[in-house]
């Protein structure tokens, strides 16, 4: 399945690259017809990265936008940092409260940046913060962006393009997320793309290429995309308000929103709609560099996935929901939800069979080699995918490092992620809801 | 078990082979492209220096001495020139366009407009537009009849960049056969032409095709009009469009009329505040803000109570345009029976106070 998706993704990305030539972003950038967009940036304890991230958002060349930062009950110096940087002033503002949220303490505008709005609210989680932002959004489209990401200058133009082409049918679009660890950042802009010197971020580079780029582009080609990353996705504001915004009782709110959107549209017998993945708008994010934080992240991701599958289980193998019900949901159920459990049972069973001489050592080693080589093939294909379509890592050295890590990814790292996901499944069964602390290091800035 | 083991070993060899093949392919891909990149890079650096000399010394530099011997040199020179044109001010880019023409690049790309390969035609049209060469106008107008819709679009864009006023009628005629998603680009081109496109737009408003009428009126709603004399014909047509069956045309017709019409057009636009379509009501409110006729203030305050957010928001933005004139009316609005009207009046008073107007 992964190799099929990668193949489809290759053709989809090539096609998008060709089309990006025809789509003249100069016109879109200057056009008075381009509708406005509200960037929603939920922030909770982001004092180290928030200023750089906001600088990158304000640098965008999208013609009409507002940046809404929603402070979700931060306990660190997030508010102080923003107040000092942007000279925030409290205002009175009428909004339409379409979606219930926890209490909003106040609205602020910036004296130095006219496009900036700040909402201070009681802690309620990321989904709740986004819903508060959706209530306050003035434009027809909104984009949810994490506070620790850096957007490329024309990322918003590129991700909005498909939505603008057919606003009545195109409801959501997502872009690529890349690993910023090791890259040089100056004034909210990625100046030089480099690989991190630490092993964990490099493994994650491969995972992001494989899962985010190849996987999602493949699903988009099959018109069965069920996840637009919460770190970088654009949505139709009205449609999102109609379905009640983000679900705050889940940690997988980004996938849950999209699956619910699919479900409601299909249940209303609306089949002609599109949700896109765009390969070229790029958003850079800081990934965990320690095993503990990475483990927490993967645990949360898997809990979110389990929650979504559980909430929308009636869609699985249900032809009423079209390709979502017949392909995407079964895929996520079998390969992502059950996959880690089946894989772990497979390892344990194989060891058991060998230990009790039911199978002999040569068979055990051959079968183990098969599993590892298959994983290696997928990982190396991800490097090939990157080389043919993007060439972000221009130096020989980086590609060589990626290839080496692609080979070794399946000798320990992958098995670790399986363990984290199984633990995430266990936490899901225990109904654990917490996000877990995700301390940030901050982007590596150029010293003047 | 023996057979299974052999099968697994064979599959392992296949996978290992594929992994090695991919690694070799990536390495060879980089190696094979390296000489071309090096050659291209060196040519490009050379031309960058030469073009810099040309722009500094201009007439003293002999452009004929600049050698362009092969396809790599052509591509490199073209790349440098296009970059210079895009990065320079309008008054300075004439010299780069002249080099582009004298080095035969215009003729080269014009020939490619007739290529059998559609991508070559698209690229040629795009680059001719970026070159800003007026020699390309006629061939690009011919390309507006290309069988490929993207070639037609790119040719229209190119003509817009070159500011070929003679092509406006041809560009408008594209709208009828274009898919909806391409029409905003055509509208943008018309907006870029500014007031020069008004005569062609006026003619196009008589078109039986509603799509053409809509996109023309949409473009018109964004054009800054400084000379409002001799627009009676256009004004008359726009008034007729206010009763068109399409809500989009009524909505943007109102905006366009407010931009060019005299304040006595207030009555026609006020009627639209009661239209069944929320888009029309919202745009009518915005239009009244543009007209700034004080007789519209009461209607706009009433529109603050519209159930649709976009309408009441547009009404509030329109009221801001009146400035101090509305303060008394807003204070009266604080006692309005509708909660949303009271809230919006309070918000607007706060905004006017912040701006030093209350």
Image (cartoon, rainbow, N blue to C red):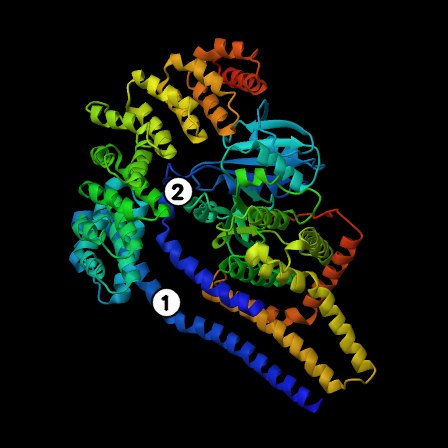
Q: Secondary structure at mark 1?
A: helix
How many neighbours does mark 2 have within 10 angstroms: few (below 14), some (14-19), or many (20 or more)?
some
Image position of B22 with respect to B154: above or below: below
For mark 2, what is the residue?
A29
Image position of A144 with respect to A328: above or below: above
Q: Is residue A422 visible?
A: yes
In front of the other: B120 or B80? B120
For mark 1, what is the residue?
B38
In front of the other: A63 or A234? A234
Q: Secondary structure at mark 2?
A: helix
- Residue at (56, 35) in percent of width and height: A68
**How far is the residue under mark 2 from the one under mark 1?**
33 Å
Image position of A64 with respect to A10: above or below: above
Give the position of the N terminus of chain A as an image quadrant.
bottom right
Q: Is residue A230 visible?
A: no
B294 horizontally vs B127: left or right? right
The location of residue A409, given as percent across then percent down, is 64, 69
């Amino acid at each position: 399945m992964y190799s099929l998706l990668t193949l489809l993704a290759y053709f989809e990305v090539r096609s998008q690259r060709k089309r990006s030539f025809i789509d003249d972003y100069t016109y879109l950038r200057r056009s008075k017809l381009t509708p406005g967009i509200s960037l929603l940036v939920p922030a909770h304890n982001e004092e180290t990265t928030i200023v750089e991230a906001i600088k990158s958002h304000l640098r965008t060349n999208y013609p009409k936008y507002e940046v809404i930062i929603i402070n979700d009950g931060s306990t660190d110096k997030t508010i102080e940092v923003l107040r000092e940087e942007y000279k925030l002033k409290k205002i009175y503002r009428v909004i339409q409260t379409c979606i219930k949220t926890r209490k909003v303490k106040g609205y602020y505008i910036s004296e130095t940046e006219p496009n900036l709005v700040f909402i201070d609210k009681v802690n309620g989680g990321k989904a709740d913060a986004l819903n508060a932002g959706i209530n306050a959004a003035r434009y027809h489209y909104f984009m949810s962006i994490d506070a620790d990401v850096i957007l490329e200058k024309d990322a918003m133009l590129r991700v909005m393009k498909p939505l603008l082409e057919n606003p009545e049918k195109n409801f959501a679009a997502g872009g690529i997320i890349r690993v910023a660890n090791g890259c040089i950042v100056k004034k909210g802009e990625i100046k030089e793309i480099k690989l991190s010197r630490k092993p964990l971020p490099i493994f994650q580079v491969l995972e992001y290429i494989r899962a985010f780029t190849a996987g999602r582009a493949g699903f988009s080609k099959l018109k069965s995309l069920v996840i637009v990353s919460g770190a970088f996705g654009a949505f139709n504001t009205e449609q999102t308000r109609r379905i009640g915004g983000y679900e705050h009782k889940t940690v997988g709110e980004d996938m849950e929103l999209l699956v619910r959107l699919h479900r409601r549209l299909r249940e209303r017998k609306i089949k002609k709609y599109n949700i896109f993945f765009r390969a070229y708008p790029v958003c850079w994010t800081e990934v965990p560099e320690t095993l503990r934080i990475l483990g927490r992240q993967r645990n949360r991701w898997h809990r979110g996935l389990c929650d979504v599958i559980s909430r929308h289980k009636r869609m699985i193998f249900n032809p009423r929901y079209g390709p979502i019900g017949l392909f995407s949901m079964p895929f996520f159920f079998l390969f992502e939800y059950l996959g880690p459990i089946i894989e772990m049972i497979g390892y344990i069973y194989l060891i058991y069979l060998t230990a009790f001489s039911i199978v002999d050592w040569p068979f055990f080693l051959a079968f183990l080699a098969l599993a590892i080589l298959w994983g290696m093939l997928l990982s190396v294909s991800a490097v090939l995918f990157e080389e043919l379509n993007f060439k972000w890592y221009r130096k020989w050295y980086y590609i060589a490092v990626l290839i080496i890590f692609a080979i070794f990814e399946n000798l320990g790292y992958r098995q670790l992620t399986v363990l984290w996901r199984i633990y995430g499944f266990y936490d899901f069964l225990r109904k654990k809801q917490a996000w877990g602390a995700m301390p940030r290091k901050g982007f590596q800035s150029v010293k003047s | 078990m023996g057979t299974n083991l052999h099968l697994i070993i064979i599959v392992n060899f296949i996978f290992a082979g594929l992994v090695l093949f991919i690694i070799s392919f990536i390495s060879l891909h980089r190696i094979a492209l390296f000489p071309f990149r090096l050659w291209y890079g060196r040519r490009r650096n050379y031309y960058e220096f030469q073009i810099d000399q040309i722009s500094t010394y201009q007439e003293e530099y002999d452009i004929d001495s600049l050698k362009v011997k092969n396809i790599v040199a052509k591509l490199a020179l073209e790349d440098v020139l296009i970059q210079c044109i895009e990065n320079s001010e309008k008054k300075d880019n004439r010299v780069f366009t002249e080099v582009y023409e004298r080095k035969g690049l215009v003729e080269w790309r014009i020939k490619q407009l007739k290529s059998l390969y559609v991508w070559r035609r698209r690229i040629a049209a795009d680059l001719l537009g970026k070159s800003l060469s007026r020699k390309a106008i006629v061939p690009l107008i011919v390309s507006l009849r290309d069988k490929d819709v993207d070639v037609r679009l790119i040719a229209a864009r190119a003509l817009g960049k070159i500011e070929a006023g003679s092509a406006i009628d041809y560009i408008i005629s594209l709208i009828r056969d274009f898919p909806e998603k391409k029409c905003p680009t055509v509208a943008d081109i018309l907006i870029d032409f500014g007031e020069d496109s008004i005569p062609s737009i006026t003619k196009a408003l008589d078109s039986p095709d509603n799509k053409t009428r809509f996109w023309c009126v949409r473009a018109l709603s964004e054009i800054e009009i400084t000379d409002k004399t001799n627009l009676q014909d256009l004004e008359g047509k726009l008034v007729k469009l206010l009763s068109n069956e399409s809500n989009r045309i009524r909505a943007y017709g109102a905006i366009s009329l407010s931009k060019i019409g005299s304040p006595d057009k207030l009555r026609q636009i006020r009627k639209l505040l009661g239209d069944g379509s929320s888009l029309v009501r919202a745009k009518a409110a915005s239009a009244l803000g543009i007209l700034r006729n004080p007789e519209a203030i009461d209607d706009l305050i009433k529109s603050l109570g519209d159930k649709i957010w976009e309408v009441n928001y547009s009404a509030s933005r329109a009221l801001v345009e009146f400035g101090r004139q509305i303060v008394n009316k807003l204070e009266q609005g604080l006692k309005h029976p509708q909660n949303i009207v009271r809230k919006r009046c309070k918000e607007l008073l706060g905004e006017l106070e912040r701006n030093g107007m209350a």
